[in-house]
Image (tube, coloured by chain):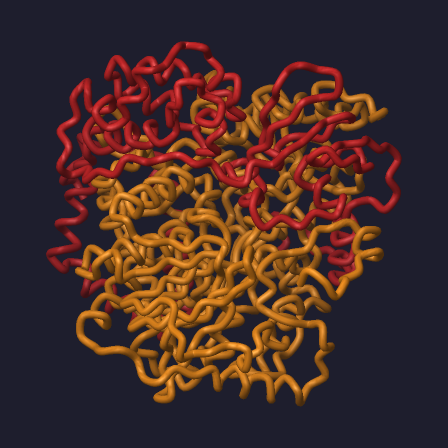
Chain colours: A orange, B red
Amino acid sequence: MTLKLIDGYPEYMRESIEMVEKTRDQRIKEKEKEKELALSDEEREEVLSKFHPDYAPGGKRKLRVGVNQGEIVPNEVADILEAWPALNPDEVDLNDIDYDVDVLVIGGGGAGTVAALWANYEGVPAENILIATKLRHGDANSMMAQGGIQAADRPWDSPIIHYMDVLGGGHFANKHELVKALTEDAPKIIKWHEELGVMYDKDEKGNFIERWGGGTSRRRMHSAKDYTGMEIMRVIRDEARNREIPVLEFSPAVELITTEDGEIGGAILWNMETKEYYVVRAKSTVLATGGWGRLHIRGFPTTNHYGATADGLVMAYRAGARLRDLESVQYHPTGAAYPEQIVGLLITEKVRTMGATPVNKYGERFVFPLEPRDVEASMFIRECFGKGNCVKTPTGMRGVWLDSPMIEELQGEGAIRKNLDAMYRMYKRFGIDMTKDPILVFPTLHYQNGGVEINANAQVLRGDGSPYPRFFAGGEVEGGVHGKNRLMGNSLLDYNVFGRRAGISAAKVARSTGKPGKLTLKHVKLFTEEVKKINVPPERRSPILLPDYRGKRVLARKIDLPVMQ
Amino acid sequence: MGKKIEILDVDSKQIMDDIKKAASPPEDVEHWVTIYVMGKPYRVPAGLTIMKALEYAGYRFIRSSGCRAGFCGACATVYRKKGEYRFRTALACQTTVEDGMYLSQIPFVPANKATYDLDKIEPTPTTLLEYYPEIARCVSCNTCTKACPQELDVMYYIQYAIRGDIKKVAELSFDCIQCGLCSLRCPAEIQHYHMAQFARRLYGKYYQPKSKWLARRLKEIESGMYEKPFENLAKLRENPEEFKSLYYKILYEGREKEEKLIEDPLELMGED
């Protein structure tokens, strides 16, 4: 590469960094005053309506098929919901059952693992549980969450205040019973983690070191350095392995199986390596497939893992489940905007909660650092594209600075290495020292706020609002908890709370009922009939399972030969 | 309105289109490098990560791609550079391609994890050795440390493990992403990352003190004292404007209140 870099940045970006350095001392002195920048309700609306991708025209359309017909969703989501089923039901023999289990868990991330553990705690023997997952056990957004997990456990906090924060963050659209479950179960979840040996950051007396989160009125973010998600995920995975719960990796579900009496009776799995299918019959089925980041809604880069392609939404929708709040997409305010190699990757909110302030090209602050994520992200877009006070990267990305060296000044030298080692390490790999230089950020596609609607028992709801007795969901795939915008630290909490509830509910069904009714894929055929009525190109099939990042030239020359198939 | 921010007149759709364009990879490639994927040469744009370069070259991952952000250990990669004897390791999603890299992705690492019931263990200085006796075979060659893409002091934590210092093992291994490269390279056939996982759980469970506040809050919840307030909130939601103003009051006053609370909160126990 010919572009000359000075400690990771080209010279012209250095000029802007100098301006950031010039205002730093003053900004540190006035750190307390940042609160004054917090926006009122009216101002939030003004900023969201003009600069949030959800509100800008051109990104969404009405669904033309299924239970939620007529509702507005992002184009990329409509594309996979209105697609031809990838699986041809006539090629599958449902009488030849490969796995006949009590509890089938679809998805081996956080929610799925928690559900399997709690089903096991509630008396379902490990060998009667099956986790089927698309990639490896633990390949999930759960592994990547950095900042923390919320739980109101300090004396001057309470589940009630936590509830209020969740509601405000979600634009008051959240479902009461789910937010109550989320906030009331939170301390129980942290206790469970303590017993499992999750290494949370604690003081010498054993109390958690708790930090701010965007849109919270109390410090209640529990963390494990900036590897919080990884620490929890690897511990619960270790526990699932200790209990010898069977896991089928690289074998995603590609369609749910329904029953003649209108229930869910298992799923069809597809071994991605051998291309064979497996029929799984289950007394109860838990959907824990995660979110949609890899759909790259509105062309945004994403923080999400490779498999986040909303397969669960597609399968549940075909089976008749109701979706909600899908028109709202979460963009995390701080994705990396530079260097090119890591564009879109998550810069944890903890960087701001530890004191780093977002500043523009001139080193000026322009936003309260801890607004709810949609507001904060909109303010960044406003500064970059509304006011033009941004830094342009050599590849054309734009961004604002997150003044990370402030953390060292405010919290003492070494605070970044101690608390944000993952961030430090990532930048260091590309030649940037975030303890000395600020980092460039821009909003990135982060989270599916809505999803498959559930009730407080984690039962999935049908189109008419009645719950499926044998079908449950937990984690990012489900909706209603976060309303139209999730707060930091509530996604790790969500998958634990509703994964647990799904596991407990699934175990109850497994204990008290016999096998499900006669298995069928009739719903897939009916859905296909619906798709026939609208104009859908023949190559548009779903679930898509994985995104395709192959080079254009290769794809243009790719041919399939009718041999070795 | 307009106290803190001025009202801007903008074309929101145009802005979104501009963002999409800015975020797409540039069409023209100025600089190229040649990499060897399992021996086959491919010309790829300079500046890509190994993972993106392989995709550019036409590979579509099933294995060896997970979080794509340095947290999951799925993309362990081994390589040599042309003309060098040195054997190198990397995470494909966190490493930039260089001209002349001979690359191979590691799809899977065979390693055995001990199984245990954590509740039934009383940790002693020999616990780690009991479950992972092979750590005693360490020859202090430091190959594990050299192989670690997280740059952890792997050999040091193995030495601490032999000595039974569970805390040190837990701390030194904390940033482990369990890619397995240490275990692949180890001449003594140690399964470092599984042993370290065991040590961290022992530390978290038995050595870190338990939170007293948490215990107190759990008792409160069990007593049912929040049921009534939750019901009241549900009712209050029927009046959205009132609910909203309560929310903003709690949000702003809460931030003020929290800032004023003292750092040693144990002294506050029972105060509210």
**Observer-nearest residue: A59 or A113?**
A113
Residue drawn at point x = 85 percent, y = 24 percent: A2
Answer with left or right where residue A328 lies relative to residue A58. left
Residue drawn at point x = 60 percent, y = 87 percent: A530
Number of numbered discs visible in the structure rendering: 0
**Observer-nearest residue: A334 or A295?**
A295
- Vertical side of A395 occupied by A414: above or below: above
Residue A246 spot, x, y in % from top left: 33, 54
Residue drawn at point x = 80 percent, y = 39 percent: A395
Residue A79 spot, x, y in % from top left: 65, 71
Residue A552 shows up from this direction: yes
Residue A378 spot, x, y in % from top left: 63, 52
Q: Residue furthest top?
A: B140
Q: Quadrant of the N terminus of chain A?
A: top right
* Residue A174, quarter of picture: bottom left
Answer with left or right where residue A236 lies relative to residue A387. left
Q: Quadrant of the C terminus of chain A?
A: bottom right
- Vertical side of A179 occupied by B87: above or below: above
